[in-house]
Amino acid sequence: MRARPYPAWISRLFIFSVAALAFTGFMQMPLAKRYYLTEVPGMAWTGDFYMVHKIHYLLAALLLFVVGLTVVNWLRAWKDTLVLTRLGALRVAVVGGLVISGGLRVYRNLPDVTLDPAVIVTIEWVHLGLVMVLGAVALIALVRKSSAYAVRK
Amino acid sequence: MSKNNDQPGKVSRRGFLKALGTGGVGLLTPSGAVAAGKGRVPQPSDNELATLLDLSRCIGCGECVSACRESNAHKFPEPVKSFPAMSPSKRAKPEDWSDKRDVEDRLTPYNWLFLQNAEVEYQGEVYDINIPRRCMHCQNPPCANMCPFGAANKQVNGLTRISDSLCMGGAKCRTVCPWSVPQRQSGVGLYLNIMPRFAGNGVMFKCDRCYRLLEKGELPACIAACPEDVQTIGPRGEIVARARELAAGMDGFIYGLEENGGTNTVYVSPVPFDLIDKAIDKDGPRGGRGKVAGGKAKGLGPGKPHMGPVKDVMADETNLATATLLAPVAGVVAGVLGLGAKLLKNGEEGSHES
Ligand code: SF4
Ligand code: SF4
Ligand code: SF4
């Protein structure tokens, strides 16, 4: 696999937060108890919807931190030396959509916010759908051995 | 509204909702882009519709229960049997109320309102309190906020509704509801068309505040049917003021202002609610007895809400929302403060990992 020209730890942080977000995201569905995941030692928390929800929020904060950092770095310096790969650009777009739909999801849950039910269903399914797309694209990238988002110009 | 109403202790009857539609609330139900554009309710506590239940008036006649059943019968599930097999069968058990439609002593998919009774001794007097129970229509409802499919929703007019065409029947709403209100019927709904064996288990049902009647400017069935005028409906600001007045007048107590951060159902009682909570038959997971009393209806989930204290269950998430707002800002600041240059250097020094 090609070496990434950007710092390893930022990749690791990104991969960790996205993977953990995907997991806690799927755990928003009532699956943990039904499929005995709660009985795996150390995984009992997956059955606590409130706990899973809060962890999802915290991980979202972590991802947003990484995104903020990366965007600024890109604008300040990286864009002169790096170029997004095609699959990288696609994943950036999908992550962007996830961030926006997730942000709307957080906004929707504020006590003084009430959105139209049709809008909420759209947000919900866009968010869920984009996770699936991201998973698929990431798998393709992995298979094609082009999992780096950006390469040197 | 209804300042000229001559009935004390009551906002008004039929027709007032019509006035409400053109005045105060403006939107009884959000319709399309208008409501979406409006989105935010600036003062949810004042403009949402809330109900007030004066428990000192309820005689336990059950007219409201019958009216609710009759009025909503067309929304009740009609499952076709037999149900598809589910995996793992030990964990995913069907919940079937279709042969128990007559059950009236708890919430079921066919009974969205029931009466609890509490005989309470208070200050040397014995009170016989009847309590109509149904969805509390929380102001920040976890059933809606936590639904992963957007099937449960709160409307701008302050009621919470579960869409029977989107619900997968996972019963998460019942688990996260502080009162375990929604009830499941298997063998109906979307899950049958997706992966009936592996995901979903029916549809969740509960009081929807008779939203169709509200849309027409009419009162919810249970309110209209009550011979004792136990219930009043109106903008929450007015309902809360009225509840306070009423409670002060009878030296009584209020349930619904603080509970779960505030609900759009406000009970006023002449006796404290913790005494009521001790006396009523309840089997909710929080403050209840855990399992259904007497072992009957096992596996069909709790359907008798408690009347204990409930903290604001979405409060932590609300606080964390700030963290998600600040996180990208922190990232940007870190980048601007020069972390970017350093990062790039590190990057050039080689991160030859796969
Ligand atoms: S009482 Fe339960 S079902 Fe009703 S709105 Fe509140 S959380 Fe939802
Ligand atoms: S508001 Fe309608 S659905 Fe809710 S309890 Fe009353 S009659 Fe039943
Ligand atoms: S109809 Fe009125 S008085 Fe009769 S049980 Fe219902 S709320 Fe009480």
Image (spheres, coloured by chain):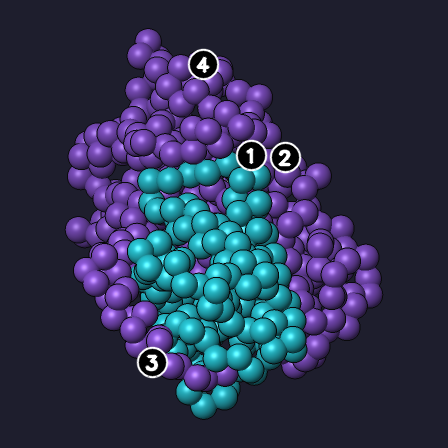
Chain colours: A cyan, B purple
Given the image, what chain letter belongs to the residue carrying mark 3?
B
Please name the amino acid that badge 1 sits on.
Answer: Cys
The answer to whether the residue bearing label 1 lies less than 8 angstroms from the nearest atom of ligand 2 is: yes
Disc 1, disc 2: CB below 8 Å? Answer: yes
Given the image, what chain letter belongs to the residue carrying mark 2?
B
Which structural element holds mark 1? loop
Given the image, what chain letter belongs to the residue carrying mark 1?
B
> Would you say B249 lies left or right of B280 here?
left
Which structural element holds mark 3? loop
Which residue is under mark 1?
B210
> Would you say B140 lies left or right of B197 here?
left
Which residue is under mark 2?
B71
Residue B233 placement: quadrant: top left
Which structural element holds mark 2? helix
Q: Residues within 10 Å of mark 3 (few under 14, many from 20)?
A: few
Please name the amino acid that badge 2 sits on.
Answer: Ser
Q: Residues within 10 Å of mark 1 (few under 14, many from 20)?
A: some
Return the disc, 1 or 2, that comes first in the chain's sequence. Answer: 2
Please name the amino acid that badge 3 sits on.
Answer: Glu
Residue at mark 4 to residue at mark 3: CA–CA distance: 68 Å
Return the disc, 4 or 2, that comes first in the chain's sequence. Answer: 4
Q: Residue at x 41, y 63 (%)?
A: A81
Residue at mark 1 to residue at mark 3: CA–CA distance: 66 Å
Which residue is under mark 4?
B22
For the N terminus of chain A, the quadrant is bottom right
**Residue B285 vs residue B230, the one in the foreground:** B285
The answer to whether the residue bearing label 2 lies less than 8 angstroms from the nearest atom of ligand 2 is: yes
Return the disc, 1 or 4, that comes first in the chain's sequence. Answer: 4
Return the disc, 4 or 3, that comes first in the chain's sequence. Answer: 4
Residue B278 placement: quadrant: bottom left
Q: Residues within 10 Å of mark 4 (few under 14, many from 20)?
A: few
